[in-house]
Amino acid sequence: MEDTHKGTLSVQMGSQQRKRGLLGHCKALLDWYLLWALPGLGMFSEAYIIFSAGQIGPFQKAMWPSCYADPITDCKEEMIKHVASYIQICGIMAGMLLWGWLGDITGRKWGSRCVAFIMLSGCILLTFTPWATTAYGYFAYFMTAQTWYGFGVGGEYPMAASSAAELSAVAPELQGLRGRQVILVFSNQGMGNFVNGIVILLSMIFFGQTGATLDADGSKNVLALTYGFGAVACLVMVVYRAIYLDESKLFEEEKAIEEHIIQKQNKDATYAIWHRHKMSAYYYWPRQMVASAAWIANDFAFYGNKLQQGLFINLLYPGSTPYKIQQWTVLNSFVALTGYYMAAWLVDKHWYGRRLMQNVGFIAMFIFYIIIYAQWEVMGDKDGHTKAGTQWFQFLYYMSSFFNQFGPNATTWLVAGEIFPTDIRSTYHGFAACMGKLGAIIASLWISYIADKRKVFLISAIWGIGGFVVTWIWLPDTTGMQLEEYDRLQRYILEGRFKEYHGEAVNPRHLSPWEKWVYGWHKKYDPSLDALQFQAEMKAVQADQDKEAERQFKRMSEVGHAHDAEHTVNPVAAVPPA
C-alpha cells in the first residue's frame, strides 16, 4: 500500500511539474509576443485604416453613387478620381517630416504618445463618416478625417522604427536580434491589413452584403463597424503608451553625452544642433539618398498595386461579387503577412542580412511583373486569357506581394532606422519614409491615368529594377553592427576627427560599394588601433565622470564589441582599393 501511495504521489508531482512547465512556456511565449505586438500597435492601425482604401470603394459607391459611381454629379470628378487617392498621403508625409524632426528633440516617448492620440481621434472621426447627410458632405468629411489620421500615421513611422531599433540595442535578450525585433514590430502592418480584410468580410456576412450588389444602409454599417474596431485598437495603443511607455534608453544616453560634451567644450546649444545637421548631411547624404530612393521604388510598386488590388482580382475573376473579391483580398493579405515573418526570421543571418534581402525582393518583383506584362494576352486580357494563364497570373501576383514584404517593404523601414546615429535617426528616417510616400503619390497619379492596365506591370517592373540598382550601389549592410558604434563614429565626425576613426563602422562588410570604392572609408579600418582608442575613450569618460557614456561603453564591451587588439585581424588588404 505504501509503495502504491508513493507511486501515486510521484505521478501527481510529475503532472504538476509538467503543468507548471507548460504555463511557463505559455507565459514566455506571451511575453515574447507582447514585446513586439504592443510597440507595433501603431503599424497595425496604420495598415488597418490606410490599406483599406482599395477595399472600401464598393461600399462608398453603394452609399453615395452620385459621388463615387459614374456619372459623378454631386462631386468634382477630378477630386474623386485623383485628389482623393493622394491627399491622405500628403498628410502622412507632413507627419513623417514634422514628427521625425521632433522625435530627435523631445524624444521618442512623447512623440509616440502624441501621434497615438492623433491616430485615435482620426479613427473616431472615420467611424462616424457613414452618417454624413450629403454626398459631398461625406466626401469632405471623409477626406478630412483620413488626412488627419494620416498626419498621425506619418509620425508613427520614425517613432516606432527608432524606438524598436534602440530597444534592441540596450535589451540584453535582444542582442544580435535587432533586425528580427524591428521587423516583427513592423509585421503588425501586415497583421493590420489581414485583420482589416477579415473584419470587412465578417461585417458583410453580418449585415447581409454577400449578394451581387451592396445596399446603402448595409454598406454604412459595414464601414462604421470596421472603423469602430480600428478605433478600439487605437484606444488600446493610447492607454498603453500613456501608462507603460518609457523613453528610449539609448536616446537618453546620447542626449546626456551630447549635453556633457557641449558643457565641456563651452559651446552654444543652438550652434551644436546646426553643426550636427551640417556635418551629418555631408557624411550621410549617400545613405539618406539610398534610404529614400529605395523606399520610393518600393512604395511605387507596393501602393500602386494595393490601390489597384480590386481591379486585379476582378481581372482574375470577372463578374465576381464584392463579397467574393473580398475573400481573395484576404488571401492575398495572408500571403503578404507570411513575407513579414520570413523577413524577420532571416534578416539577422550573416549569410543573408538586410542588403541581400532587399535586393532579392526587388529582383523578384521585377521578374514577376515583367512576366505578367509579357504574357498579358493569356494571363490578364479579358478576351484572350486562358484558365492556365489566369492561374499563373494569380500565383505571380500573390508571390509579388510575398517578396515585397520579404524584401524591400520590410528592409526599407528597418535600415532607415539603423544606418544613421541616434541624434539624427528619427529625422532621417522620417525624411526617407516621406520620400517613399512620394513614390506612392506618383503611383496613384500615374496609374490613375493609365487606361491599359498591362502597362502598370511594366512600370512597376522598371521601378523594381531601379530599386535593385540603388540598393546594390549605395546601401550599407548593418547586419551584426551595433548602433552605439554609429554614435561613437558620430562623435568623431562632430569633433572633426573622422580620419582618426578606425572602428567597426568602417569595416568593409558594413560599408556600401560607394563608400568603399568612391570614398575609400574601408582603408581606415584598423581593429588593433581601434581597440587602443576604445580603451582610451573609456578611461576618458570615467575620468570625466560621464555616467551615461560610461554605461554605453561598458555595454558595448559586454556584448562583444571587437576591441581586443590581440585577437583581431585587419581585413583591409582583402578589399580592392578605391
Image: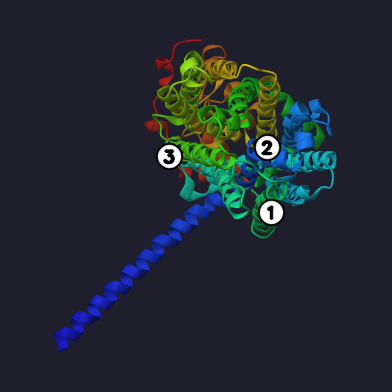
Q: Specify the amino acid type for callout 2.
A: Gly
The answer to whether residue 218 is seen in the rendering is yes
Q: Nearer the viewer, residue 301 or 62?
A: 62
Q: Is residue 503 visible?
A: no
Q: Which residue is mark 3?
A: 345
Circle nearer the N terminus (3, 1): 1
Q: Look at label 1 and name its amino acid.
A: Gly
Q: Is residue 90 shown above or below 233? A: above
All told, the count of numbered labels is 3
- Image depth: mark 3 or mark 2 in front: 2
Locate residue 319, reporting x and y percent: 56, 32
Task: Tell me if label 3 and label 1 are in contact, CB under 8 Å.
Answer: no
Q: Point out the frontmost of discs 2 and 1.
A: 2
- Residue 348 placement (x, y as % from top left): 44, 36
Quadrant, the N terminus: bottom left
Please give the label number shown on residue 57.
2
Mark 2 neighbour class, 10 Å CA radius: few under 14, some 14 to 19, many 20 or more: some
Please state which of residues 465 and 140 is positioned toward the viewer in this rendering: 140
Left or right, 67 with reference to 324: right
Instruction: Find numbered disc 3 in the image and state the secondary structure of the residue it sits on.
Output: helix
Instruction: Give the spatial CA distance, label 2 vs label 1.
Output: 18 Å
Q: Earlier in the sequence, mark 3 or mark 2?
A: 2
Disc 3 and disc 2: Cα gap in Å?
35 Å
* Foreground disc of the pair 3, 1: 1
The answer to whether 433 appears left or right of 315 in the picture is: right
Q: Please tell me the numbered disc located at residue 228.
A: 1
Amino acid carrying mark 3 in the image: Trp
Q: Looking at the image, which is closer to me, 113 or 505?
A: 113
Classify 10 Å Cα crowding around label 1: few (below 14), some (14-19), many (20 and above).
Answer: some
- Write down the quadrant of residue 576 in the picture: top left
